[in-house]
Every structure is written in structure tokens, then in C-alpha cells.
Amino acid sequence: MASERPLMVQVEDVHKRFGPLEVLKGINMTVRKGETIVIIGPSGSGKSTLLRTINHLERIDKGRILVDGQLMGYRETAHGIKELPERVVARQREMVGMVFQRFNLFPHMTALGNVMEAPIHVRGLKRRDAIQQATELLNKVGLGQKLASYPHELSGGQQQRVAIARALAMEPAVMMFDEATSALDPELVGEVLNVMEQLAHEGMTMLVVTHEMGFAREAADNVLFMDGGVVVEEGTPEAIFDHPRTERARAFLRAVLQSSRDER
Amino acid sequence: MNFDPSVFWHYLFYGPIVDGAKLTLIMAVVSQTIGIVLGLFLALGRLSRSKLPVWRWLSGIYIWLFRGTPLLVQLLFVYDAIPQMTGESIVLGSITSGIIALSLNEGAYMAEIIRAGIQSVDPGQVEAAKALGMTYTKTMRRVVLPQAVRFVIPPTGNEFISMLKNTSLAEVVSAQELLYNTQQVYANNFFYFELLSVAALWYLAMTTVATWIQSRLEQRVEYRNTIPNRGGLFGFAFPGMHRG
Ligand SMILES: Nc1ncnc2c1ncn2[C@@H]1O[C@H](COP(=O)(O)OP(=O)(O)OP(=O)(O)O)[C@@H](O)[C@H]1O
Ligand SMILES: [Mg+2]
């Protein structure tokens, strides 16, 4: 059934290098509408880089990426592929919401200001409508009481929930999360994961880099295991976590389980 | 040593002295303002990663030139050399020359201050703004510059204090600012000590007020309690070392 849903993200043979270092070595993956895809993999395997190529924060050297059918960051011409002007790229990025490990909230704006900023200054929403929308979103993530708080007055978990609301305010086609809980104190991880699970269940299309196995089992349609710039294994959470086929995946999962046990 | 207090008091609010102080203040405010605007464009030029590096190069050359030569030489260039170069078709008045030279010079210093301010903003802020669909201009205006202001205000305050004092260089092109008018007076009555004290007191009054305004501005842009307020009572009077 899920396979008949339209494709929201198509990553086709994407290569990316930083100088001599090839970080992505031919990535292929898709996210269908309403799906949640979780990406796991050791540090340096290219997970963040992959997400950043999808909203064209990073150029690619080969391959192509489509979001909602649109070629991201480039256009095909008679003379090959050309990068789009930054104005057009900026418009394309509206389709992709992104949540960062370190929140990256705007420290000079309140929670409400953070969420309203892009709707007003990018989408051109009227101030009144933007306030209403931002208030609803902050209520949704459980921060209806914190509208006027500045980021430094909020806990890490609260800040990350504001960041989620801020990304949602652009009504993106896809939400990407790059280790959204790994900068948080252990006791604050749950409140952020809850919001993410709720979003997944509401049918948001999500691409999530995380090492939270519980979240993956609960919310993911598919899990991708990346290592050394390639997708090594792909399958349902059960298949990947309970019956990993490759030694690399087994070793990685052992290490993650070990470290999460150490934390408890 | 004979310091005659009655002479000092007589000239403290003497018409030409007060007028000179007014002109000093006006020249400093106008030049500082132009310098900030100029500095912003130069800073953005220096930081531009455009495929056409012309803007970046021009900014670099400008800053190199204006920081690397004495302000006094720049002032004399504007006042004396431009008329000669243009065959007397451009002759600038002494006040205009003073403001132009001070502004051009200040632009180079402000460029470096603003560039450092922009670079102090967490790159994650730019990422977040871009990810929300903001263009370069929007990102700068709404996210980067408002945060850079916090880093830029303290050194800009120092710049303005230098500026107040540097206006006295315009004395050499006969701009009738505070020092020039002071000299005019003591050239006739030879009360050097008293009159230079009067001038010094005026400069001190202006720089003190400027420092006070700076510290108020710093407090106003404070939004993180992690950055400590500087100073306490009179803390504002010692904002650190500075050239000039
Ligand atoms: N801007 C850059 N310039 C040079 N090298 C980079 C850059 N960004 C990432 N890299 C390198 O690319 C590789 C992949 O990095 P990436 O951040 O995508 O890994 P990751 O899977 O997200 O790792 P982590 O779990 O630590 O976040 C790393 O070796 C990293 O050092
Ligand atoms: Mg990463």
C-alpha cells in the first residue's frame, strides 16, 4: 500500500566530495509521502551531508535529488546541469523543513518570533495570520505558555520543540531531523521524541537521522544503515535491528546498544 | 606656573569655543555615520563568496589603502591634491574636506569591525535561516546583522571616541572646529595653558557622554544573560585599550 504513495524525496546516485575526501559515494534512496525514514550509521558516514544535499545546503558532484518532483538546486540545460540562482534555491528550500542537532534558534527573537519569522518574511503572510499560526504550532508542541520566552530562557528540550514548530510553520512537504535529540540531556529526549512521533503518526513525511532505536521501532517505515558514504543495509526496523545482515551493521548496533545502556 | 582660573572660566563658554565644539560634534557624528554605512558595504564585500570577486578585491584594496596611510595625509589629499588633480574644477571647503577624509578613513576601520562582528555570529544561524528559505539578503538583514550588532557596538563606541578627537586634525585645513578656534584665541592673547585646558575639557565632556551612550546601547542589545555586563559604576569610562 505504502509503495503506491507519491515520491516526496528521490535521491539518485548522489556523490559528494570535500576535496580529496569522498563523503557520499553513490547514494540511492526514496521517501514516499507520509513515510518516516530513519537513517543510522557511525560518525562520519555522511548522514548529515546527505540531509544537507537534499535541501541544497551542500552542492553535489554527481547524481540528482528531487523533492516533490522538483530537481533540487539545479536545472537541466542543453549543455548539462547548471546550478540555480540562490533566489530560486531559497524558494525550493521552503519545501524542506530542517531541525538541527544544536537547535539554531534565533537568539534575538522570542519563541513566537522564531516561529513567525519565515512565514512573514519568506512566505509573505500577514502578521496577524502568522501570529495565529505560530501560536497554534507552539501549542501543538506543548509550549503555549512560552510564547514570549527567549531561547536562552528555555530548556534544551523546549528549544528543540520551538525549532520543530519553526520548521513546521513553513508547511514543508518533508521534515528532516539531524540528530535532533543528541545534544539534549537524557531526561529531555523524551519530550522531543514524543513530538516527532506525533508528527509521524499524523502523516508528516519525515527523514530522520537518529540513534534512538525506540523512536525508529515506533515510527519508522524503513531504516537505512549508512557507512563510509554508502547505504549498506535498508529494511524495516525489525529487519535492521533484530536481523542485521552485514557485519558492519551488527558491530554498529552493538556499539549503540552498549552506549545507551551506559547512559541509563 | 601661573594658571589664571578667571581666564579659564571666561573662555569655557566663549562663543567661538562653543561654536567650535558644536562643529567638532557635527563632523564626528556625520563622519561616523557615513563610516558605518561605508564599512558595512566594505565588510559585505570582503565576505562575499561570489564567483565574481571584484567587490571583494576592491574592498580589500580600499581597506589596505585607508588603514595603511595616515589620516592627516588623506585629509591633505582631499583638501589640496584633489583641486590640483582636477585642475581646480573640484575644490572642497575645509569642513567638507574634513568630513570626507574622516568618513573614508573611518569606513576602512568600520569594515574590519563589522566583518569581525558578522564572523562572530554562529554559522548555524545562517544554516537555519537558509533552511527556512531565506535569501542571502534576508538572512543578513533579519538574522546575522541584528546579532552582529552586539559584537560591533563596543568597538564602534571606541571608534567614535577616536573620531571626536581626530576631528582636531581638520585644524590644518582651517576647519573652524574646537581646536582651530582655540588656537585662534590664544594666538592673540597667549593664554595657552588656560585655553588648551578649555579645549581639553570640551573634548573630555564629549567623549564622556559618548562613552555613556555606548554603555547604554550595549545594555539595550543584551538578550542573553550569559554575556556579563561590563563595568559597574564608572565601568563605562574604561572600555579598554584603543589606538589614537
Ligand atoms: N564542510 C566540510 N568540509 C570538509 N569535510 C567535511 C565537511 N562536512 C563534513 N565533512 C566530512 O565528511 C564526513 C561525513 O560527515 P557527516 O557530518 O556527513 O557525517 P555524519 O554521518 O553526520 O557524522 P556524525 O554522526 O558525527 O554527525 C566526515 O568525515 C566529515 O569530516
Ligand atoms: Mg551528523
Image (spheres, rainbow, N blue to C red):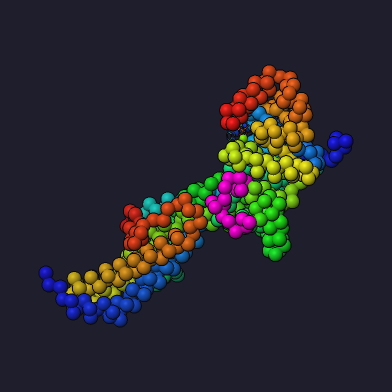
Seen from the viewer's position, the closer of residues B230 and A140 is A140
Residue, far top = A247
Q: Is residue B197 above or below residue A155?
A: below
Seen from the viewer's position, the closer of residues A171 and B180 is A171
Q: Residue at x 66, y 24 (%)?
A: A253
Quadrant where the image shows the C terminus of chain A: top right
Q: Is residue A22 above or below residue B215?
A: above
Drawn side of residue A178 relative to residue B228, left or right: right
Task: Report the span colored magenta.
Answer: A145-160
Seen from the viewer's position, the closer of residues A181 and B129 is A181
Drawn side of residue A20 relative to residue B234, left or right: right
Drawn side of residue B138 relative to residue A2, left or right: left
Residue B28 seen in the current view:
yes
Q: Residue at x 81, y 41 (%)?
A: A33
Ligand 2 picture quarter: top right
Q: Residue B111, position in %: x, y?
A: 46, 54
Residue A252 seen in the current view:
no
Q: Residue B18, position in %: x, y?
A: 32, 77
Residue A154 inside the magenta-drawn segment: yes
